[in-house]
Image (cartoon, rainbow, N blue to C red):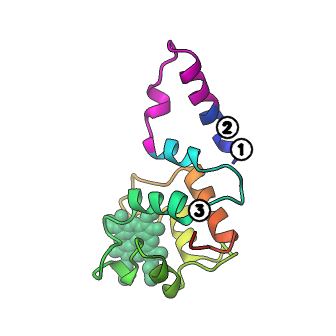
Protein backbone atom coordinates (compact mmCIF):
# COMPACT_ATOMS: atom_id res chain seq x y z
CA UNK A 1 0.00 0.00 0.00
CA UNK A 2 2.71 2.43 -0.94
CA UNK A 3 0.13 4.94 -2.12
CA UNK A 4 -1.17 5.35 1.45
CA UNK A 5 2.19 6.47 2.80
CA UNK A 6 1.41 10.19 2.42
CA UNK A 7 -1.79 9.69 4.37
CA UNK A 8 0.06 7.99 7.20
CA UNK A 9 2.59 10.79 7.23
CA UNK A 10 -0.26 13.27 7.18
CA UNK A 11 -1.94 11.66 10.18
CA UNK A 12 1.38 11.57 11.99
CA UNK A 13 1.94 15.22 11.24
CA UNK A 14 -1.52 16.11 12.53
CA UNK A 15 -1.03 14.31 15.82
CA UNK A 16 2.52 15.57 16.18
CA UNK A 17 1.95 19.22 15.35
CA UNK A 18 -1.29 21.09 15.99
CA UNK A 19 -0.66 23.92 13.53
CA UNK A 20 -0.87 21.76 10.41
CA UNK A 21 -4.09 22.24 8.44
CA UNK A 22 -6.16 19.07 8.83
CA UNK A 23 -8.73 19.75 6.13
CA UNK A 24 -6.92 17.76 3.47
CA UNK A 25 -6.54 14.77 5.75
CA UNK A 26 -10.20 14.65 6.83
CA UNK A 27 -11.64 15.56 3.43
CA UNK A 28 -12.28 11.90 2.62
CA UNK A 29 -13.33 9.96 5.74
CA UNK A 30 -13.35 6.72 3.76
CA UNK A 31 -9.64 7.05 3.05
CA UNK A 32 -8.93 7.35 6.77
CA UNK A 33 -10.97 4.27 7.62
CA UNK A 34 -9.20 2.33 4.88
CA UNK A 35 -5.76 3.48 5.97
CA UNK A 36 -6.14 1.97 9.44
CA UNK A 37 -6.89 -1.46 8.04
CA UNK A 38 -3.95 -1.92 5.70
CA UNK A 39 -1.28 -3.44 7.83
CA UNK A 40 0.05 -5.45 4.92
CA UNK A 41 -0.75 -6.27 1.31
CA UNK A 42 -1.96 -9.75 2.25
CA UNK A 43 -4.02 -8.53 5.20
CA UNK A 44 -7.09 -7.32 3.31
CA UNK A 45 -10.31 -8.16 5.11
CA UNK A 46 -13.72 -8.40 3.47
CA UNK A 47 -15.49 -7.14 6.57
CA UNK A 48 -12.97 -4.45 7.52
CA UNK A 49 -11.81 -3.19 4.13
CA UNK A 50 -14.16 -4.20 1.32
CA UNK A 51 -17.61 -3.93 2.88
CA UNK A 52 -17.02 -0.30 3.97
CA UNK A 53 -16.17 0.58 0.35
CA UNK A 54 -19.32 -1.14 -0.93
CA UNK A 55 -21.39 0.52 1.78
CA UNK A 56 -20.01 3.92 0.84
CA UNK A 57 -20.44 3.67 -2.94
CA UNK A 58 -22.73 0.79 -3.84
CA UNK A 59 -25.31 -0.43 -1.38
CA UNK A 60 -27.59 2.56 -1.90
CA UNK A 61 -28.60 0.59 -5.00
CA UNK A 62 -27.08 -2.85 -4.50
CA UNK A 63 -28.83 -4.18 -1.40
CA UNK A 64 -31.87 -6.24 -0.67
CA UNK A 65 -33.93 -8.51 -2.89
CA UNK A 66 -34.53 -5.80 -5.52
CA UNK A 67 -30.83 -5.01 -6.03
CA UNK A 68 -29.79 -4.32 -9.67
CA UNK A 69 -28.77 -7.54 -11.41
CA UNK A 70 -29.66 -9.39 -8.20
CA UNK A 71 -26.32 -8.18 -6.83
CA UNK A 72 -26.69 -7.57 -3.10
CA UNK A 73 -23.29 -6.18 -2.10
CA UNK A 74 -24.12 -6.49 1.60
CA UNK A 75 -24.09 -10.28 1.26
CA UNK A 76 -20.83 -12.14 0.60
CA UNK A 77 -22.57 -15.35 -0.51
CA UNK A 78 -24.63 -13.52 -3.12
CA UNK A 79 -21.59 -11.73 -4.51
CA UNK A 80 -19.78 -15.02 -5.01
CA UNK A 81 -22.83 -16.87 -6.38
CA UNK A 82 -23.35 -14.30 -9.12
CA UNK A 83 -19.84 -14.79 -10.42
CA UNK A 84 -19.00 -11.07 -10.56
CA UNK A 85 -15.86 -11.87 -8.55
CA UNK A 86 -13.39 -14.48 -9.80
CA UNK A 87 -11.08 -15.36 -6.90
CA UNK A 88 -7.38 -14.68 -7.63
CA UNK A 89 -8.24 -12.88 -10.88
CA UNK A 90 -9.12 -9.25 -10.27
CA UNK A 91 -8.62 -8.27 -13.92
CA UNK A 92 -11.02 -11.01 -14.96
CA UNK A 93 -13.64 -10.07 -12.37
CA UNK A 94 -16.64 -8.13 -13.67
CA UNK A 95 -16.96 -6.26 -10.39
CA UNK A 96 -13.36 -5.02 -10.54
CA UNK A 97 -13.65 -4.20 -14.25
CA UNK A 98 -16.74 -2.08 -13.56
CA UNK A 99 -15.24 -0.10 -10.69
CA UNK A 100 -11.82 0.36 -12.33
CA UNK A 101 -13.39 1.51 -15.60
CA UNK A 102 -15.80 3.83 -13.79
CA UNK A 103 -18.89 1.94 -14.99
CA UNK A 104 -19.88 1.50 -11.35
CA UNK A 105 -21.05 3.45 -9.49
CA UNK A 106 -22.97 4.80 -12.51
CA UNK A 107 -23.56 8.34 -11.32
CA UNK A 108 -20.71 9.81 -13.36
CA UNK A 109 -18.99 12.14 -10.93
CA UNK A 110 -18.21 9.51 -8.31
CA UNK A 111 -15.34 7.07 -8.73
CA UNK A 112 -13.37 5.01 -6.27
CA UNK A 113 -9.96 6.26 -5.18
CA UNK A 114 -6.81 4.49 -6.36
CA UNK A 115 -6.33 3.16 -2.84
CA UNK A 116 -9.84 1.70 -2.79
CA UNK A 117 -9.37 0.12 -6.22
CA UNK A 118 -6.07 -1.37 -5.06
CA UNK A 119 -7.80 -2.73 -1.98
CA UNK A 120 -10.49 -4.47 -4.00
CA UNK A 121 -7.89 -5.91 -6.40
CA UNK A 122 -5.78 -7.14 -3.48
CA UNK A 123 -8.80 -8.79 -1.86
CA UNK A 124 -9.79 -10.59 -5.08
CA UNK A 125 -6.22 -11.62 -5.86
CA UNK A 126 -5.90 -13.02 -2.33
CA UNK A 127 -8.76 -15.38 -3.22
CA UNK A 128 -11.66 -13.11 -2.24
CA UNK A 129 -11.91 -14.59 1.27
CA UNK A 130 -14.92 -14.07 3.54
CA UNK A 131 -12.78 -12.71 6.35
C1 LIG B 1 -27.19 4.36 -8.71
C2 LIG B 1 -27.37 2.94 -8.49
C3 LIG B 1 -26.11 2.07 -8.49
C4 LIG B 1 -24.97 2.22 -7.74
C5 LIG B 1 -24.66 3.28 -6.70
C6 LIG B 1 -24.11 1.11 -8.10
N1 LIG B 1 -24.71 0.33 -9.05
FE1 LIG B 1 -23.96 -1.38 -9.87
N2 LIG B 1 -25.59 -1.55 -11.05
C7 LIG B 1 -26.64 -0.66 -11.10
C8 LIG B 1 -27.53 -1.04 -12.19
C9 LIG B 1 -28.81 -0.31 -12.58
C10 LIG B 1 -26.97 -2.18 -12.80
C11 LIG B 1 -27.47 -2.94 -14.00
C12 LIG B 1 -28.24 -4.14 -13.56
C13 LIG B 1 -28.68 -4.95 -14.74
O1 LIG B 1 -28.25 -4.71 -15.87
O2 LIG B 1 -29.46 -5.87 -14.52
C14 LIG B 1 -25.76 -2.48 -12.06
C15 LIG B 1 -24.95 -3.56 -12.32
C16 LIG B 1 -23.79 -3.88 -11.62
C17 LIG B 1 -22.99 -5.05 -11.84
C18 LIG B 1 -23.29 -6.15 -12.83
C19 LIG B 1 -24.21 -7.16 -12.16
C20 LIG B 1 -24.45 -8.35 -13.03
O3 LIG B 1 -24.79 -9.42 -12.48
O4 LIG B 1 -24.33 -8.24 -14.25
C21 LIG B 1 -21.94 -4.98 -10.98
C22 LIG B 1 -20.80 -5.99 -10.82
C23 LIG B 1 -22.09 -3.78 -10.20
N3 LIG B 1 -23.23 -3.13 -10.61
C24 LIG B 1 -21.23 -3.38 -9.22
C25 LIG B 1 -21.36 -2.18 -8.52
C26 LIG B 1 -20.41 -1.75 -7.54
C27 LIG B 1 -19.18 -2.53 -7.10
C28 LIG B 1 -20.85 -0.54 -7.08
C29 LIG B 1 -20.17 0.37 -6.09
C30 LIG B 1 -18.79 0.70 -6.37
C31 LIG B 1 -22.09 -0.23 -7.78
N4 LIG B 1 -22.35 -1.26 -8.63
C32 LIG B 1 -22.86 0.90 -7.54
C33 LIG B 1 -26.86 0.40 -10.25
C34 LIG B 1 -25.93 0.89 -9.33
Of the numbered discs 3 and 2, the one sitting upstream in the chain is: 2
The dot on residue 90 is none
* Foreground pick, 58 / 52: 52
* Foreground pick, 79 / 114: 79
Q: Which residues are magenta?
A: 9-29
Asked whether the viewer can see residue 101, the reply is no
Q: Residue furthest bottom?
A: 81
The mark closer to the camera, 3 or 1, is 3
Query: Which of the image's four quarters has the C terminus?
Result: bottom right
Asked whether the viewer can see residue 28, the reply is yes
Residue 95 x, y percent position in the rendering = 53, 73
Q: Which residue position is annotated with label 3?
A: 45
Disc 3 residue lies near ligand 1 with CB under 8 A: no
x 63%, y 66%: residue: 123
Residue 34 x, y percent position in the rendering = 54, 49
- Vertical comparison of 49 with 96: above or below: above
Between the C-alphas of marks 3 and 2, the distance is: 19 Å
Magenta residue check for 34:
no
Q: Residue furthest front?
A: 131
Q: Which residue position is annotated with label 2?
A: 5
Q: Secondary structure at mark 3?
A: loop
Disc 1 residue lies near ligand 1 with CB under 8 A: no
Of the numbered discs 3 and 1, the one sitting upstream in the chain is: 1
In the image, is 50 to the left or to the right of 58? Answer: right
Amino acid sequence: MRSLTPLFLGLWAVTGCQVIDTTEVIADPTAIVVSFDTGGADGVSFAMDIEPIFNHYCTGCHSGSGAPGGLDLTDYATIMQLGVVTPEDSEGSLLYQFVSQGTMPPTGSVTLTDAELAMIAAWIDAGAPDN
